[in-house]
Amino acid sequence: MELDAEHRPLVRYNFFVHRHHPAYRLVTMAGQPFPSGTSESDWRQTRTRDADDVNAEVREAIARDGYSLFQIGLSLSDLPKP
């Protein structure tokens, strides 16, 4: 097991892009099972990042749900009106 500078276990996150819908991105904790409800073969891993290089909201979603799913490429017109 890799350790960080404070000798804690190093936590890493895997980032994926959907093969057929590339605007969708999935983030999981490295070493954990792939989320049920989707197939790992539908996703292409793009990178692995250390925990300190992942937004807190993403880490919290993964701790709660086992994954974080988001979409890129939205426009400002996609924002809900107040």
Image: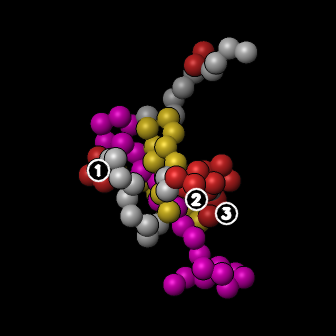
Q: Do the residues labelled 2 and 3 touch (CB within 8 Å)?
A: no
> For the residue labelled by badge 2, is the local secondary structure a helix, a strand or a loop?
helix
* Mark 3 residue crowding within 10 angstroms, few (<14) / some (14–19) / many (20+): few
Residue 36's spot in the image, x, y percent? 35, 52
* Mark 1 residue crowding within 10 angstroms, few (<14) / some (14–19) / many (20+): few
Between label 1 and label 3, give the one nearer the viewer: 1
Q: Are marks 2 and 1 in contact (CB under 8 Å)?
A: no
Number of numbered markers: 3
Q: Foreground: 61 or 42?
A: 61
> Does residue 65 appear in the picture of this structure?
yes
User: What amino acid is at disc 1?
Assistant: Ser
At x 30%, y 36%, the residue is 20
Q: Distance between the residues labelled 2 and 3?
A: 15 Å
Please identify the quarter of the rendering in which residue 50 is found: bottom right
* First of labels 2, 3 by sequence position: 3
At x 54%, y 26%, the residue is 74
Q: What stretch is highlighted in magenta?
A: 1-22
Asked if the stretch drawn in magenta spans residue 4, the answer is yes
User: What amino acid is at disc 2?
Assistant: Ala
Q: Distance between the residues labelled 2 and 1?
A: 20 Å
Q: Are marks 1 and 3 in contact (CB under 8 Å)?
A: no
Q: Look at the image and tell me in which quarter the C terminus lies.
A: top right
> Which mark, residue 63?
2
> Which mark, residue 67?
none
Q: Say which residue label 3 marks.
A: 52
User: What amino acid is at disc 3?
Assistant: Asp
Between label 2 and label 1, give the one nearer the viewer: 2
* First of labels 2, 1 by sequence position: 1
In the figure, is residue 34 to the left or right of 63?
A: left
Q: How far apart are marks 1 and 3 (CA)?
A: 28 Å
* First of labels 1, 3 by sequence position: 1
Q: Say which residue label 1 marks.
A: 39
